[in-house]
Amino acid sequence: MPRKVKKRSIDEFVIDRVKEMRSEAGFSQEDIAVWLDVSGGFIGQIESRNFRAKYNLHHLNELAKKFKCSPRDFLPEQPL
Protein backbone atom coordinates (compact mmCIF):
# COMPACT_ATOMS: atom_id res chain seq x y z
CA MET A 1 0.00 0.00 0.00
CA PRO A 2 1.47 3.42 -0.95
CA ARG A 3 2.14 5.72 1.93
CA LYS A 4 0.10 8.88 2.29
CA VAL A 5 1.82 11.99 0.96
CA LYS A 6 1.54 15.12 3.07
CA LYS A 7 2.43 18.48 1.57
CA ARG A 8 3.77 21.19 3.83
CA SER A 9 1.38 23.91 4.89
CA ILE A 10 3.28 26.58 2.92
CA ASP A 11 3.04 24.46 -0.23
CA GLU A 12 -0.68 23.89 0.33
CA PHE A 13 -1.21 27.62 0.83
CA VAL A 14 0.57 28.50 -2.43
CA ILE A 15 -1.23 25.77 -4.37
CA ASP A 16 -4.62 26.85 -3.02
CA ARG A 17 -3.86 30.50 -3.84
CA VAL A 18 -2.84 29.70 -7.42
CA LYS A 19 -5.90 27.49 -7.85
CA GLU A 20 -8.17 30.23 -6.46
CA MET A 21 -6.69 32.86 -8.78
CA ARG A 22 -6.83 30.43 -11.71
CA SER A 23 -10.49 29.68 -11.11
CA GLU A 24 -11.46 33.32 -10.61
CA ALA A 25 -9.78 34.23 -13.91
CA GLY A 26 -11.45 31.34 -15.73
CA PHE A 27 -8.24 29.50 -16.57
CA SER A 28 -7.90 25.72 -16.72
CA GLN A 29 -5.15 23.48 -15.43
CA GLU A 30 -4.13 23.07 -19.07
CA ASP A 31 -3.75 26.85 -19.45
CA ILE A 32 -1.37 26.87 -16.49
CA ALA A 33 0.51 23.89 -17.91
CA VAL A 34 1.05 25.64 -21.25
CA TRP A 35 2.33 28.80 -19.53
CA LEU A 36 4.76 26.80 -17.41
CA ASP A 37 5.75 24.41 -20.23
CA VAL A 38 4.74 21.36 -18.21
CA SER A 39 2.09 18.69 -18.73
CA GLY A 40 -1.52 19.15 -17.70
CA GLY A 41 -1.11 16.03 -15.59
CA PHE A 42 1.65 17.72 -13.61
CA ILE A 43 -0.67 20.60 -12.71
CA GLY A 44 -3.26 18.01 -11.69
CA GLN A 45 -0.68 16.40 -9.42
CA ILE A 46 0.19 19.77 -7.92
CA GLU A 47 -3.46 20.46 -7.12
CA SER A 48 -3.99 16.95 -5.72
CA ARG A 49 -3.20 16.23 -2.09
CA ASN A 50 -2.05 12.73 -3.13
CA PHE A 51 1.17 13.74 -4.89
CA ARG A 52 4.31 15.58 -3.80
CA ALA A 53 4.36 17.84 -6.87
CA LYS A 54 4.38 21.55 -6.07
CA TYR A 55 5.16 24.91 -7.63
CA ASN A 56 8.72 26.21 -7.49
CA LEU A 57 9.93 29.82 -7.54
CA HIS A 58 10.32 29.82 -11.31
CA HIS A 59 6.71 28.66 -11.68
CA LEU A 60 5.48 31.39 -9.34
CA ASN A 61 7.45 34.04 -11.20
CA GLU A 62 5.98 32.92 -14.54
CA LEU A 63 2.46 32.80 -13.08
CA ALA A 64 2.89 36.30 -11.66
CA LYS A 65 3.65 37.53 -15.18
CA LYS A 66 0.45 35.95 -16.52
CA PHE A 67 -1.71 37.14 -13.62
CA LYS A 68 -0.02 40.56 -13.71
CA CYS A 69 0.78 40.45 -10.01
CA SER A 70 3.78 40.01 -7.75
CA PRO A 71 5.09 36.53 -6.94
CA ARG A 72 4.47 37.60 -3.33
CA ASP A 73 0.74 37.51 -4.02
CA PHE A 74 0.94 33.71 -3.90
CA LEU A 75 2.50 33.68 -0.42
CA PRO A 76 0.98 34.21 3.03
CA GLU A 77 1.59 37.53 4.76
CA GLN A 78 2.81 35.78 7.90
CA PRO A 79 4.88 32.59 8.28
CA LEU A 80 2.82 29.42 8.65
Image (cartoon, rainbow, N blue to C red):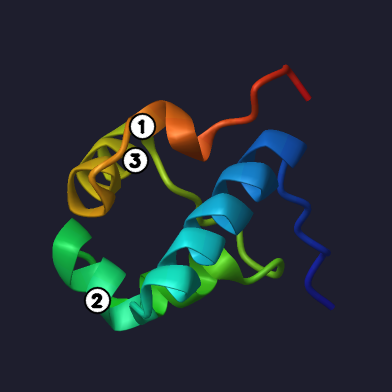
Amino acid type assigned to the residue bearing label 2 in the image: Asp
When asked about the image quadrant of residue 39, the answer is bottom left
Amino acid type assigned to the residue bearing label 1 in the image: Pro
List the residue tagged with mark 1.
71
- Near-viewer residue (52 or 32): 32
Q: Are marks 1 and 3 in contact (CB under 8 Å)?
A: yes
Q: Is residue 46 left or right of residue 64?
A: right
Q: Residue furthest top?
A: 79
Amino acid type assigned to the residue bearing label 3 in the image: Leu
For the residues labelled 1 and 3, the Cα–Cα distance comes to 6 Å
List the residue tagged with mark 2.
31
When asked about the image quadrant of residue 43, the answer is bottom left
In the rendered structure, which disc, 1 or 3, sits on the residue that comes first in sequence?
3
Can you say which quadrant of the picture contains the C terminus?
A: top right
For the residues labelled 3 and 2, the Cα–Cα distance comes to 14 Å
Residue 26, given in percent of the width and then of the height, sits at 37, 80
For the residues labelled 1 and 2, the Cα–Cα distance comes to 18 Å
Label 1 Cα crowd, 10 Å radius (few <14 / some 14-19 / many 20+)? some
- Near-viewer residue (76 or 4): 76
List the residue tagged with mark 3.
60
Residue 21 higher or lower than 8, as above or below: below
